[in-house]
Image (cartoon, grey):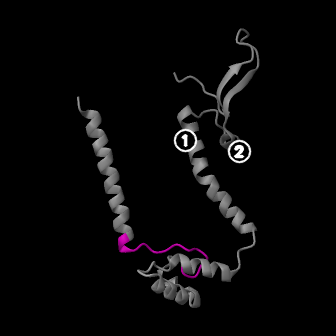
Amino acid sequence: MIPPTGIFFDRVARTDPADPDSAKIGLGRFHAELWMLSWFGIDFLGFSKAQLVATRFFFDALFPFVLLFLVSFVTKPARKEHLDRFYAKLHTPVQKTPEEEEKELKRSFQDPDRFKKHMCFPNSNWEIEKPTRMDIIGFGGSWVLVGIIIFLLWLVTSIR
């Protein structure tokens, strides 16, 4: 049997431990994430402690993005000239010398759409670049290193 756990608090205790009929109070951290999700009708009574922690984790991971999108829909976008200048600087590759860099930046400022062909969604406001061969190699190489580290950890912990 898994003992019950508090939903909105780390622990739940009686106000008077000697009286089993006394009111319960929450102790420890208040889990505002679960409280907010309960507004949408989610019933957490059947959740185990692990499920509650996982739900809090997913809420903490996803809620900032949901909030970001909602705020972006109701606020006025920045002026196109400012965005073009910013993204021109962002997408212009670094050059070997400051002079070459200045030349490329000037070229990007004159034609801010020159990098549109590198975008996943070229006719939208999304600035997501298509991955290059080097991006894919770097991503794959990072995962190979993660695998090596996990293997080494397993190896070290299995030595007797």
- Magenta stretch contains residue 129: yes
- CA gap, disc 1 and disc 2: 15 Å
Tell which of 134 and 120 is nearer to you. Answer: 134
Q: Is 24 on the left-hand or right-hand side of 138?
A: right
Q: Which residues are magenta?
A: 122-134
Give the SS element for disc 1: helix
User: Is 141 placed above or below 76 here?
Assistant: above
Q: Which residue is mark 1?
A: 54
User: Is 100 placed above or below 10 here?
Assistant: below
Please give the name of the residue rendered at 29% of the width and 39% of the height, measured from the top-left corner.
154
Q: Which residue is mark 2?
A: 36
**Residue 25 placed where, x, y %?**
73, 24
Crowding near the residue tagged with mark 2, few <14, some 14–19, many ≥20 C-alpha atoms within 10 Å: few
**Residue 101 placed where, x, y %?**
48, 83
**Residue 12 placed where, x, y %?**
67, 24
- Looking at numbered disc 2 in the image, what kind of residue is underneath it? Met
- Magenta stretch contains residue 139: no
Crowding near the residue tagged with mark 1, few <14, some 14–19, many ≥20 C-alpha atoms within 10 Å: few
